[in-house]
Image (spheres, rainbow, N blue to C red):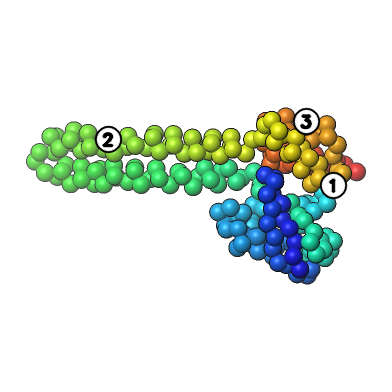
Amino acid sequence: MKIFVKTLKGTHFEIEVKPEDSVADVKKNIESVQGQDVYPAAQQMLIHQGKVLKDATTLEENKVAENSFVVIMLSKNKVSSTGTSSIPAAPSNTAQPAGSTDQARQTITAPQATAALPQSASESAPASAPVPAAAASSVTDVYDQAASNLVAGSNLETTVQQILDMGGGSWDRDTVVRALRAAFNNPERAVDYLYSVSLQLALLL
């Protein structure tokens, strides 16, 4: 059967599934269709009629029928994973000083050890210089990505309505607006707040 998967940005796509498929299988299906870099299965959260679907349950158990829609969002560590993906560039730059230190060790055994040491030190300094630039660019990338997730103006009203639809009546408009304000208009963080509060209330009851 065919179901629709909606994103918090208002876009959607369709996938082919079976009623007996587990939620974990559906997540893997989405990962294969959309790409591991876009929707990694381990970070996906699927929501249907205001309920977060558990991996071990099936679509049939969650009453997900033909042409139904589920909402997808990613867990918080999405930003950190993209942030760390740009960090491995730094070790490649710092690998050169290691080579120069080996060279320094070799020159120590030579008679002109004292003259070679300052030269190797001066060579290692420029090699480590690009590291702050790489770190700065990675911080900028993370900031740009975070800024792109924020909503404002007319998009804010659309996002509020989408979150209300996603909740299936679990939250009122004021609650959603407060959650967005607390999340600095980041819809994914706001939904995360709403579901964490709902879960805490459910546990208290």
Q: Which residue matches tag 3? A: 178
Left or right: 121, with 87 as reference point: left
Residue 7 x %, y %: 69, 49
Q: Nearer the viewer, mark 2 or mark 3?
A: 3
Q: Which residue matches tag 2? A: 126
- The part of the image, by quadrant, that contains residue 183 is top right
Residue visible at 61% across and 54% down? Answer: 39
203 w.r.t. 61: above or below: above
Q: Secondary structure at mark 3?
A: helix
Of residues 111 and 22, the one drawn nearer to the viewer in this rendering:
22
Residue 60 x %, y %: 82, 65
- The part of the image, by quadrant, that contains residue 195 is top right
- Mark 2 neighbour class, 10 Å CA radius: few under 14, some 14 to 19, many 20 or more: few
Left or right: 92, with 15 as reference point: left
Residue visible at 80% across and 64% down? Answer: 66
Q: Which of the image's four quarters has the N terminus?
A: bottom right
Q: Is residue 149 visible?
A: yes
Q: CA distance from mark 2 to mark 3?
A: 50 Å
Amino acid bearing label 3: Arg
Q: Secondary structure at mark 2?
A: helix
Residue visible at 44% across and 37% down? Answer: 137
Residue 161 x %, y %: 78, 40
**First in sequence: mark 2 vs mark 3:** 2
Q: Are marks 2 and 3 in contact (CB under 8 Å)?
A: no
Amino acid bearing label 1: Gly
3 w.r.t. 175: above or below: below
Q: CA distance from mark 1 to mark 3?
A: 18 Å
Marking on residue 168: 1
